[in-house]
Image (cartoon, rainbow, N blue to C red):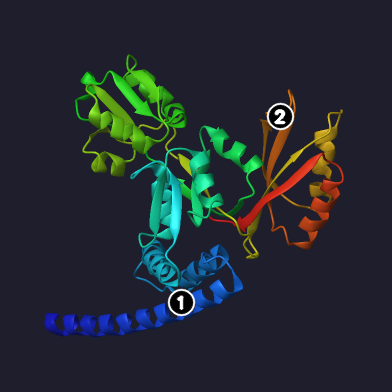
C-alpha cells in the first residue's frame, strides 16, 4: 500500500474515532444527569478501575497498556468535565508531586486548586469549595506523612481512591552545584536524599518547605539557592536540573490519597483503612488484632500516632484487604467496636498495582 493510501486510511479511522468518542461523551453526559439526581459522586473510582482493566484485556497490541491508560485517562477526564466541572484541591503549587499525582488520576480537563497545607486541602473539600482533595500519605523510604494522618483523625472525609507514583528527585538551581549554599525542599524529601546530600553537597543549609514546588519557587527568587523537586517544577520556575535521580533508594515511590465526602462501592479487590484507640491495659493491642485473624483478613499496614488529647494515648491506623461492606469485614469490625474505646472507618477504596 502506498504512503498516500496509508494516510487516507488513517484519516478514515480518525473520523470514525471522533464520531465514537462524541457518542461516548454524550452517554457520559446522561450518566452525569443520573448521578446528580441520585446525589452520587461524579468521580467513580470503582468504574474507573473497571474501564481500565477492560482496556488492558481488549488490547492486542502493538500499542502498550500504559499508552492506552494515558489516552483513556484524558478521555475520562474530558467525560468528567462534561458530567460536571470538577474542582480538585491538592497540596503544593504547580509542579508539586501531589499535583502530578492528581493529574495522573484526574487528567488535565478538570480544575485544580493548589493549597499550601494538608489542612487547607481538607478544608476545601469539607466546605464544598472542591469536590475532591489529593494528599500524600506515605513514602516507601521515609514512611507516613504525619500531617495527613492527623487530619484523618478529626475529619469526616473519606478515602475514596489511592494513587501510587514513582518519585524521582532532582537538585535544581539557577547557579552551578559549587555555588549552591542553601537548598529548599519538603522534610520528607530531605530524608529520601540524605546520603546523596551528605556526600555531594555537605556544606549546604537544608531549609524545610511546605512542598517541593514551593521550594522551586523560592529557589528561583534567591541567590546561591537550590531546591529538590520534580523536573516539571524546575521547568515551570525556570531552574536548571543540576543532578537527576538523587534519591538514595532507586525504587522510591509515594502513595497519595483521594479524599471526598462520599463512600465508594466495592470492586472485589479493595483496601480499607480504619483508626482506633485502645484501652490502656496489658495485651490490648493483641486483642484488637484477634478479629482480623479470626476472619482471615490480611493486614497490610499498622501505624501508631499520639492522640494529642491525652498524654501517652495513641491512635492506631490499620490498612487491610477487603471492603467495609464485605461480610467478613463487617463481622470483624463489629467485634472490634466492642473491644476498643473508639473506632472509625476512614474509607474503603480500590487497590491499585
Circle 1 residue = 28
Left-right relation of 308 to 189: right
Q: Quadrant of residue 74?
A: bottom left
Left-right relation of 300 to 60: right
Looking at the image, tell me whether mark 2 or mark 1 is earlier in sequence order.
1
At x 39% / y 53%, what residue is drawn?
Answer: 112
Circle 2 residue = 309
Q: Position of residue 259 (x, y in %)?
A: 55, 52
121 vs 161: above or below: above
At x 17% / y 80%, what residue is drawn?
Answer: 7
Q: Position of residue 172 (x, y in %)?
A: 27, 32
Closer to viewer: mark 2 or mark 1:
2
Residue 284 visible, this angle: yes
Q: Quadrant of residue 213?
A: top left
Which quadrant would the N terminus be assigned to in this image?
bottom left
Residue 170 visible, this angle: no
For this rendering, which residue is in front, 337 or 69?
A: 337
Q: Are marks 2 and 1 in contact (CB under 8 Å)?
A: no
At x 33% / y 45%, what residue is drawn?
Answer: 94
Q: Position of residue 325 (x, y in %)?
A: 73, 62
For this rendering, which residue is in front, 256 or 54?
A: 256
Amino acid at each position: 500500500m502506498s504512503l498516500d493510501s496509508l494516510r487516507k486510511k488513517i484519516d478514515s479511522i480518525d473520523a470514525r474515532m471522533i464520531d465514537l468518542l462524541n457518542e461516548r461523551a454524550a452517554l457520559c453526559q446522561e450518566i452525569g444527569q443520573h448521578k446528580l439526581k441520585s446525589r452520587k459522586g461524579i468521580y467513580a473510582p470503582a468504574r474507573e478501575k473497571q474501564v481500565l482493566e477492560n482496556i488492558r484485556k481488549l488490547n492486542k497490541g502493538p500499542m502498550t497498556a500504559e499508552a492506552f491508560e494515558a489516552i483513556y485517562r484524558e478521555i475520562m477526564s474530558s467525560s468528567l468535565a462534561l458530567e460536571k466541572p470538577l474542582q480538585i484541591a491538592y497540596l503544593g503549587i504547580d509542579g508539586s508531586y501531589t499535583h502530578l499525582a492528581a493529574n495522573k488520576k484526574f487528567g488535565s480537563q478538570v480544575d485544580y486548586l493548589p493549597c499550601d497545607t494538608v489542612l487547607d486541602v481538607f478544608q476545601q473539600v469539607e466546605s464544598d469549595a472542591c469536590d475532591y482533595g489529593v494528599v500524600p500519605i506515605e513514602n516507601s523510604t521515609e514512611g507516613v506523612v504525619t500531617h495527613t494522618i492527623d487530619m484523618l483523625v478529626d475529619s469526616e472525609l473519606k478515602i475514596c481512591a489511592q494513587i501510587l507514583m514513582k518519585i524521582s528527585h532532582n537538585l535544581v538551581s539557577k547557579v552551578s552545584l559549587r555555588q549552591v549554599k542553601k537548598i529548599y525542599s519538603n522534610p520528607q524529601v530531605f530524608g529520601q536524599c540524605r546520603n546523596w546530600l551528605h556526600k555531594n553537597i555537605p556544606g549546604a543549609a537544608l531549609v524545610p518547605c511546605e512542598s517541593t514546588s514551593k521550594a522551586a519557587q523560592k529557589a528561583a527568587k534567591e541567590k546561591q539557592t537550590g531546591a529538590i523537586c520534580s523536573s516539571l517544577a524546575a521547568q515551570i520556575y525556570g531552574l536548571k536540573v543540576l543532578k537527576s535521580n538523587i534519591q538514595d533508594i532507586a525504587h522510591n515511590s509515594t502513595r497519595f490519597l483521594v479524599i471526598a465526602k462520599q463512600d465508594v462501592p466495592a470492586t472485589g479487590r479493595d483496601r480499607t483503612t480504619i483508626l482506633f484507640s485502645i484501652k490502656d491495659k496489658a495485651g490490648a493491642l493483641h486483642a484488637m488484632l484477634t478479629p482480623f485473624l479470626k476472619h482471615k483478613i490480611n493486614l497490610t499496614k499498622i501505624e501508631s500516632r499520639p492522640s494529642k488529647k491525652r498524654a501517652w494515648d495513641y491512635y492506631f491506623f490499620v490498612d487491610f484487604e477487603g471492603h467495609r461492606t464485605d461480610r467478613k469485614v463487617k463481622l470483624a469490625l463489629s467485634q472490634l467496636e466492642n473491644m476498643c474505646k473508639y473506632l472509625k472507618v476512614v474509607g474503603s477504596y480500590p487497590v491499585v498495582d
